[in-house]
Image (cartoon, rainbow, N blue to C red):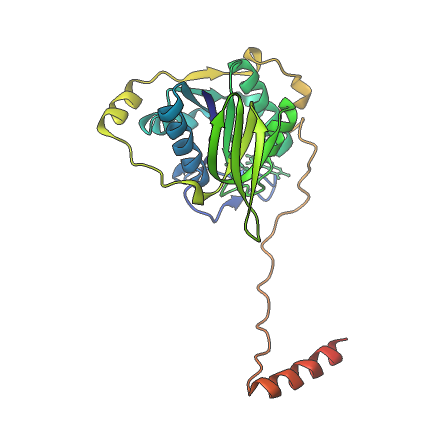
Amino acid sequence: MNIIVCIKQVPETTEVRINPETNTLMREGVKSIINPFDMYAIEEGVRLKEKFGGKVTVLTMGPPQAEAALKEAISLGADEAVLLSDRAFAGSDTWATSYTLAAGVRKLKEYDLIICGKQASDGDTAQVGPGIATHLDIPQVTYVKKIEEVKDKTIKVERMTEEGYEIIESSLPLLITVVKEINTPRVPSLRGLMRSKQAKITVLGVKDLDVETANLGLCGSPTQVAKIFTPPARPEGEKIKGTAEEIVVKLAEILKREK
Ligand SMILES: Cc1cc2nc3c(=O)[nH]c(=O)nc-3n(C[C@H](O)[C@H](O)[C@H](O)COP(=O)(O)OP(=O)(O)OC[C@H]3O[C@@H](n4cnc5c(N)ncnc54)[C@H](O)[C@@H]3O)c2cc1C
């Protein structure tokens, strides 16, 4: 089973700073980690490989420093790593990011399953996984919490919903996004750490991909950020005290008053 795991390097803090002039994320001076949801994606990929054979390739789009995230993924059991890095990719919104990652996937040719995290802890949109599947024109299942079965080029997964879960069967290749309920990520082994030190990362730029340059980076991003700000804290609500009967009467009065 050939598995591609898309991982994103994110700032360790959830309090990302925004450049007020360009309205883009400021990553300088902040320690970077693998997006926490992507740790579950890596673990699931490695578990599937251990069960069915094949290989796990980790793929990221980012600056040269994102190599560290790929090396960490190798220490956790991934076999190969590809970094999509080019100045032309800078400033991508989720559409341009998923377009570029889809081009990276096409370059890898053979794959059965693409695994993404549910969402990134900085951008937080949860759009990139579904975006990659759309660009590749393959099926997708989001919020996967369990892989039930893989058989004869089909896969059965459990998908988390607000009320419970759905069981979905799909043909392969498929893209899934995973939630943290799916597994417990392992810690790297000594052998894994040694392997990651020697690992060679494949770096691909614009000239290596079959892409329209007009679709890349800030220019290729259809979303324009007009303004980013922290919304003011909401004022504290009104607490109603009393017996159940008193509370019901008071609440009805308030609802009437507020129309
Ligand atoms: C309108 C808009 C404008 C933006 N402009 C800029 C900008 O100018 N500069 C800038 O730096 N950022 C910008 N961003 C942020 C950038 O678009 C996102 O960081 C990026 O597209 C990923 O989206 P996300 O963080 O919401 O990931 P999500 O969609 O939440 O991520 C879900 C999953 O997709 C995968 N994934 C996401 N990103 C990557 C990646 N890079 N490589 C591999 N896998 C990935 C991971 O598996 C991840 O768990 C912008 C975002 C928006 C919404």
Residue 128 is at least partly visible in this image = no
Residue 134 is at least partly visible in this image = yes
Task: Give x and y (percent) for residue 135.
Answer: 64, 24
Extreme-left residue of the structure: 190
Foreground residue among 37 and 154? 154
Quadrant occupied by the C terminus: bottom right
Instruction: Say left or right for 38 vs 134.
Output: left
Instruction: Say left or right for 60 vs 259.
Output: left
Above or below 242: residue 82: above
Which quarter is ligand 1 in?
A: top right
Extreme-top residue of the structure: 207
Extreme-right residue of the structure: 259
Task: Give x and y (percent) for residue 220.
Answer: 67, 26
The quadrant in which residue 126 appears is top right
Foreground residue among 197 and 150? 150
Task: Give x and y (percent) for residue 200.
Answer: 36, 16
Quadrant occupied by the N terminus: top left
Above or below 157: residue 213: above
Instruction: Say left or right for 100 vs 186.
Output: right
**Who's the residue at 38% across and 39% down the image?**
31
Task: Give x and y (percent) for residue 93.
Answer: 62, 33
Instruction: Say left or right for 216 vs 48.
Output: right
**Who's the residue at 45% across and 40% down the image?**
37
**Who's the residue at 51% across and 18% down the image?**
111
Q: How many marks?
A: 0
